Image (tube, rainbow, N blue to C red):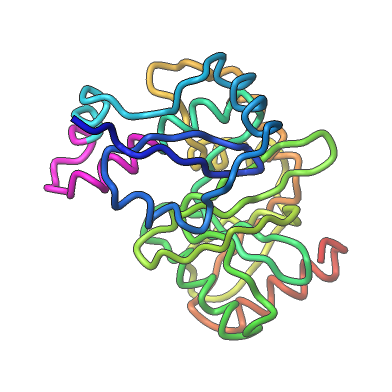
Amino acid sequence: MQLPETYWIRLADTPLWIQPKSPKLRTFFQDYIIQPTPQDKQAFQALTGGDQPLTVSREELEQEARWDPRPFPAAYLESLALYRKLCHLLLLSDILLFHCSALEVEGKAILFTAKSGTGKSTHARLWRERFGPAVTMINDDKPLLKVEPHEVRVYGTPYAGKEGLHTNTSAPVAAIVLLRQGQDNHIQRISMQQAYPVLFQQSYRRAGGEGLPHTLDLVGKLAALPVYTLDCTISQEAVELVYKRLKGDGYL
């Protein structure tokens, strides 16, 4: 029996050697596939402690299916199980999955996060309508954040929600905006203590608590960024309010 194909991808500046079972995942990862250099191979070995491609076991697929009883295609479940495995590994390099819509404007990224169904994708769409090609949609659902000593960078991934909006690019994070539905538009800067629990809820954590102290530390560094709450309507006025506030505060 012929083994599945192996290939290399790069996520958050990290070379990763993978062996998906479904051939459909090559199309899924197509914007992130690379030809590895010797340095890439060395970096992968240093990260994983081995020289075998990353793959998903039957048990991991079955576990992924148990998270949600809906009858998802096998390739989709494999993509989720693989991302879970990759995120576990990337945490070792201070890289964290953060649920948000991430867009880039004027060379800086703004992360819009909220509980599911609040409207973060809708708000990001309003930015694209307002600024057109001056806005790049980095990722509309599950980007990766690399927490470095002097900045946090957001990276596109193909895990980008229902619309699949993503770009293989990165940008330094200027601010995080916590969206809440409101009757009018109001923005407010909040403290690290206020921001932390919300940011923690939107960050991926390993099941069973493994790596939790490291995740807590990374979320603390996210909370040190400029974080705002935005009570808003679905309107261009909400976009203008955020843009002018971030401009006025010197973050854009």
Which residue is at 32% across, 29% downward? Answer: 56
Name the foreground residue: 18 vs 178.
18
Where does the magenta region start and end? 65-82
Q: Name which residue lies at 14% across and 41% down.
A: 69
Above or below, comparing residue 84 to residue 42 in the picture: below
Q: Quadrant of the C terminus?
A: bottom right
* Magenta-span inclusion, residue 201: no
Nearer the observer, 247 or 11: 11
In the picture provided, is 6 more to the left or to the right than 229?
A: left
**Between 181 and 132, which is closer to the camera in this rendering?**
132
Q: Quadrant of the N terminus?
A: top left
Where is residue 134 shown, x and y percent of the image?
69, 79
- Residue at the (56%, 14%) spot, across then down: 49
Q: Is residue 60 left or right of residue 38?
A: left
Residue at position x 34%, y 49% in the image: 25
The secondary structure making up most of the magenta span is: helix
Coordinates of residue 233 in the picture (x, y in percent): 50, 76
Query: For residue 136, what is the image quadrant?
Result: bottom right
Of residues 198 and 194, which is closer to you in this image? 198
Residue 114 in the figure: left or right of residue 185: left
The image shows a total of numbered marks equal to 0
> Where residue 124 sits in the image (x, y, percent)?
54, 70
Quick check: 39 above or below 252?
A: above
Q: Position of residue 197 (x, y in %)?
A: 56, 36
